[in-house]
């Protein structure tokens, strides 16, 4: 699926060492599924630096959420657990990470919510009342990629043939599911660890000029070897 990162620079290579600490889900690279949210963030960052807003688009292989190789934490709303996690991470300014998750997904603590977090920490509002307030807010979305390994699940979309390649990848994974009676996670694992995927992802091979059916036949032969 497509995800977006708002900033004032085009992201060509993700460098975790440049990511801030003391953020909602800890030290990591943040994206969102909402283009408008990324555009708003980019505009805000650009206003701080007197530059121009830039939104970088990525393809996220969301099967990573179910991949046993990754430790994943997902919050489906403003929950008690979400609040505790965000408070702990925002309080951490001494080290880069206080948890060992590869990927964390959930709502954003925007400026208004962050201000109320300070009220909560100062005992000016109870946890119960704070969480009740949050029920009336429309959640903003974010995914934090906390480890170098998890970043492999993101592909930069900036080439003219990227959209075509991504569409072919989806068709190949779907066909693997149908032919082998396996779920999406298993099919994606087979495909993204194959040599065929490596050739398709490399535009210099011209694999993307073939039909997805031709590539699937090559993939099947590789898998059967």
Image (cartoon, rainbow, N blue to C red):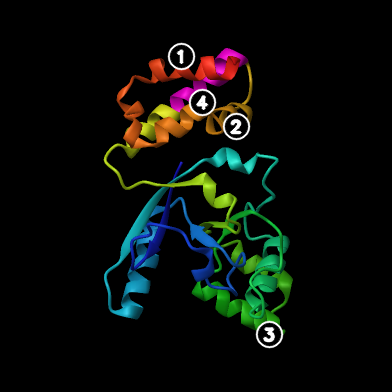
Q: Residue at x 31, y 29 (%)?
A: 206
> Is residue 140 at all visible to an observer of this figure?
no
Please, what is the dominant secondary structure of the magenta stretch? helix
Q: Could you say where residue 132 lies in the image, as x and y percent from the top left?
A: 66, 66
Magenta residue span: 170-180
Q: Nearer the viewer, residue 10 or 17?
A: 17
Give the Cα distance between marks 3 and 4: 52 Å
Tell me the element at label 1. Answer: helix
Tell me the element at label 3. Answer: loop
Q: Quadrant of the C terminus?
A: top right
Give the Cα distance between marks 1 and 3: 64 Å
- Say if 121 sits above or below 128 in the image: below
Q: Could you say where residue 121 lies in the image, as x and y percent from the top left?
A: 69, 81
- Say if 72 sits above or below 213 in the image: below
Q: Could you say where residue 61 lies in the image, as x and y percent from the top left?
A: 52, 40
Q: Which mark is residue 60?
A: none
């Amino acid at each position: 699926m497509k995800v977006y990162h708002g900033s004032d620079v085009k992201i060509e290579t993700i460098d975790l060492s440049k990511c801030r600490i003391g953020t909602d889900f800890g030290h990591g690279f943040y994206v969102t599924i909402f283009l408008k949210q990324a555009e708003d963030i980019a505009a805000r960052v650009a206003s701080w630096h007197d530059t121009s807003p830039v939104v970088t688009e990525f393809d996220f292989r969301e099967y990573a959420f179910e991949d046993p190789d990754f430790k994943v934490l997902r919050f489906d709303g403003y929950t008690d657990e979400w609040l505790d996690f965000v408070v702990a991470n925002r309080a951490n300014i001494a080290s880069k990470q206080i948890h060992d998750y590869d990927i964390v997904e959930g709502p954003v603590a925007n400026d208004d919510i962050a201000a109320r977090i300070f009220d909560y920490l100062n005992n000016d509002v109870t946890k119960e009342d704070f969480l009740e307030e949050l029920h009336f807010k429309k959640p903003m979305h974010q995914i934090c990629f906390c480890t170098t390994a998890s970043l492999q699940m993101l592909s930069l979309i900036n080439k003219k043939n990227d959209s075509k390649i991504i569409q072919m990848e989806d068709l190949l994974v779907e066909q693997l599911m149908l032919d082998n009676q396996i779920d999406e996670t298993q099919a994606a694992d087979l495909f993204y660890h194959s040599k065929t995927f490596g050739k398709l992802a490399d535009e210099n091979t011209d694999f993307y000029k073939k039909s997805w059916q031709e590539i699937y036949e090559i993939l099947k032969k590789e898998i059967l070897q």
